[in-house]
Image: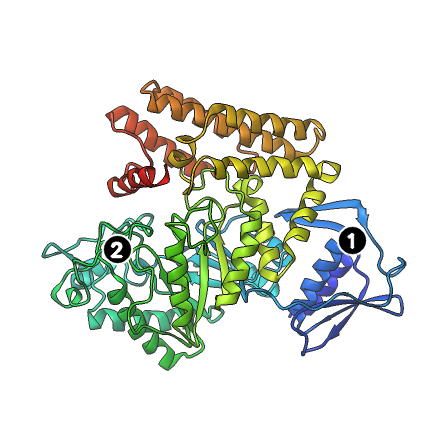
Amino acid sequence: MYTTLQFARDEAKKYGVEAQFVLEPALSSFEIRRTDGHLVIAAPCDLELLYGVYECAEQFGGYTFFAPGHDHFDERLKVNPCTSNLPDGTLLPARPPRLKRRGFIQEFPFNSETPMLFDWMAKNKLNYLLVWMKYYDELSDALKQAAALRGIEIESGHHNFDYWIPGKTYGKTHPEFFAEINGKRITPSGNAELLLSEQLCTTNPELRAEIARRMLEYCDTHPEVHTISLVPNDGFGWCECENCSKFYDKNEKGDFYSLSEHVYKADRIYHDMVRDIAARVNRVRPDIQITLVAYVNYCAPSPGFTLNAGMAVHFAPYWRCINHEINDMHCPINSHYADDLRQWCKAKRGGEVNVYEYYMGVNFYLSLPMIHFHEMFHELQWYHDIGVDGILTQFHLPHWTVYGLNYYLMAKAARGADEATAINDILRRLFGPDAGEAKAFYNNIKQLLLTMGNCHIPYPDSLFRRTTPADYQRLLAQAQGLAAKAPADRFRQELVIWMDYLCRFKTLFDRIHASQATTEDVRQLLEWIHTHRATRIFVHERFDLYFQGIQEALRTGRKWLHFNIDWEDEYIRRHAEMLK
């Protein structure tokens, strides 16, 4: 069987890392040393040895592992630690990771790019991937082994009430398993792609027993899986039967910051279900970890709820403000999320807390600007200080030019890198002598976001309503200046396309709000976006969904704000009042 240690040795040869491997279990992480003129990688385990190889390749070998599928090599960055004037001793001391779990949330099927994703994650010392169960079921044994070889744990989960109790099956045999709304059991739609607000009758004891049985069966069938989710279908729609209603006070609504003020809280009913089912599973399989999510109208731990061993919560600061750090007590949005997160950390009784982030612009994949470099280091340090165990973020490979720096720096911050060193180093590696100009470009994007108003939740209305076309023209000119200095640099050329897109979207936005836009205007912009399929700027299927929604609003004469969902649009109106 091919092992991680063998893989580490092969990767060392591939990247020209000539080093002796030493296992030292007492170390907190890998350590790079120079002994008698020779390079030594010492580490507590084989995985950390692999991480040490990649660190040597970046620090001394001239490599930069910025983008999946492309190892950037620059001869000018190469330093031979064996023949240089470096003294013997510790070159890079062992440094414990800032956070234990570090990784991604994948909301799309595995595909031909999956091997390069696993490869990039290991090179940047990420060790966790949360995926939808329906996608995990399609993962080949070879890719499972590739992930395990690189120390990547894959959680099979996400929104999965319908996975455990499929509506198309149980809707016929056990209609009592589904939510009762207005005195009538719902009829599950069977639309597994978007089960918004279709929940279960979570207090039903037979339902709970069936979910526990299916979880145990699943783990027996997938012995490589050690973490699974028990997460509601997205949205609301909780059961209102007599038993479930005992867990509600319909006068106790959710909160404005978590977009749930229009519904009553569901924390008690959800957490009672999780507590029961986790206990049933752990009595049989104490090695299985069950995750829940903190989200919308179940953001905070309910009274008396504890995160016991074998349980973990993924805390999602949905529609967070990106103009303030998450623990900024002056932010009317983030301050509440920070309070909730502190409560979750206090609720730990052997369990874990992970933060489910949106370093790609809060779940819309629309390639709007989110420059979160420095804030990320501060936030992850605060997470460490209050007892958070992990950081996960949603992502997509097709928009790497837009958000890749966030992902790269998240990985650095989660492992404990120094803020200024990491940021300056990646800009120098990507832009060489133009690093200062690139830094100014990103700083100007950041300043635009900070100066247009107080808070900013990154959906189009919040951004474009408070900025001008000239703002984006200036950024476009800067990107063009960077690109002109390195015409063969694909990354720089794609920055120009990104800024051009923002100019075009801003123009369309203004025309819509001046009642001048037509569906043809929208079609032309979408067609222009699709001419750039070979780039890493756009998640094209998301743009199709979004811009078709704009076209529908124009056809029906409805005022367009976002996805044409009534309750969501109302929050945008409320935000407009607050943010101004």
- As measured in the structure, the alpha-carbon distance from the residue carrying label 2 to the one carrying label 1 is 53 Å
* Element marked by disc 2: loop
**Quadrant (top left/top right/bottom left/bottom right) for the C terminus:** top left
Q: Residue furthest left?
A: 183
- Tell which of 239 and 261 is nearer to you: 261
Label 2 neighbour load within 10 Å: few <14, some 14-19, many 20+: many
* Element marked by disc 1: strand
Please name the residue that numbered disc 2 is placed on. Answer: 254
Which quarter of the figure has residue 96? Answer: bottom right
Query: Along the horizontal axis of the image, is 427 left or right of 328?
Result: right
Kind of residue at disc 1: Gly
Query: Along the horizontal axis of the image, is 471 left or right of 59?
Result: left
Q: Name the residue at 59% across, 46% down.
A: 405
Kind of residue at disc 2: Gly
Which quarter of the figure has residue 230? Answer: bottom left
Query: Along the horizontal axis of the image, is 10 left or right of 37?
Result: left
- Tell which of 208 and 388 is nearer to you: 388
Q: Position of residue 148 (x, y in %)?
A: 57, 65
**Quadrant (top left/top right/bottom left/bottom right) for the N terminus:** bottom right
Query: Along the horizontal axis of the image, is 138 left or right of 574?
Result: right
Q: Position of residue 35 (x, y in %)?
A: 85, 70
Residue 61, disc: 1
**Residue 2 visible in the picture:** no
- Tell which of 95 and 540 is nearer to you: 95
Q: Position of residue 347 (x, y in %)?
A: 38, 72
Q: Name the residue at 25% across, 28% down.
A: 558
Q: Name the residue at 48% across, 45% down.
A: 360
460 relative to 429, above or below: above
**Residue 63 visible in the picture:** yes
- Whichever of labels 2 and 1 marks the residue nearer the N terminus, that label is 1
475 relative to 73, above or below: above
Q: Position of residue 358 (x, y in %)?
A: 46, 50
